[in-house]
């Protein structure tokens, strides 16, 4: 949402809106897939209950991969907009460094 305040172009706003919808959908999928890992749901805690579960390790690795991709998208999104700013090169490098601190 902070990017929406900073980057005012229509393309940036459209991309950020799409990304916000993607992150919301992805968040709902993460919550849903975590809840419905096993059927019936109580089997998650009690293996003696009849039912089935998906492989939790594979689910967590897949979700971690999507999290990493989302993080990189958020990290690299502002770079083209920052590069096009009409400011001194040193100030531009410092500003990119400040945005890159989010990677930590």
Image (spheres, helix red, strand yellow):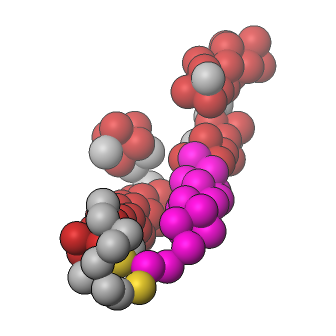
Residue placed most toward the observer, 26 or 37: 37
Work out whether 103 lies above or below 62: above
Left or right position of 80 against 102: right
Residue placed most toward the observer, 44 or 103: 44
- The reply to whether residue 27 is visible in this rendering is yes
Residue drawn at the location 52% of the way across and 66% of the way down: 56
**Whole-percent x, y for residue 90 in the image:** 75, 12
- Most extreme residue toward the front is 48
Residue placed most toward the observer, 56 or 101: 56
Viewport quadrant of the C terminus: top right
**Whole-percent x, y for residue 17 in the image:** 36, 65
Residue 64 painted magenta: yes
Residue drawn at the location 63% of the way across and 51% of the way down: 68
Count of marks placed on residues: 0
**Whole-percent x, y for residue 67 in the image:** 55, 54
Left or right position of 4 against 81: left
Residue 63 painted magenta: yes
Residue placed most toward the observer, 20 or 37: 37
Tell me which corner region of the image, top left, top right, bottom left or bottom right, holds residue 9: bottom left
Q: What's the magenta region?
A: 53-71
Left or right position of 103 against 25: right
Tell me which corner region of the image, top left, top right, bottom left or bottom right, holds residue 38: bottom left
Viewport quadrant of the N terminus: top left
Residue drawn at the location 62% of the way across and 68% of the way down: 58
Residue drawn at the location 37% of the way across and 69% of the way down: 47
Work out whether 84 lies above or below 65: above
Kindly report the secondary structure that dominates the magenta region of the rendered protein: helix
- The reply to whether residue 36 is visible in this rendering is no
């Amino acid at each position: 949402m902070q990017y929406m305040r900073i980057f005012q172009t229509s393309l940036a706003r459209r991309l950020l809106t799409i990304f916000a919808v993607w992150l919301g959908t992805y968040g709902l999928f993460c919550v849903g897939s975590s809840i419905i890992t096993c059927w019936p749901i109580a089997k998650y805690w009690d293996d003696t209950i009849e039912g089935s579960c998906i492989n939790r390790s594979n689910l967590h690795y897949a979700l971690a991969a999507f999290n990493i991709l989302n993080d990189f998208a958020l990290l690299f999104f502002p770079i083209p907009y920052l590069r096009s700013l009409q400011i001194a090169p040193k100030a531009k490098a410092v500003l990119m460094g400040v945005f890159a601190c989010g990677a930590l």
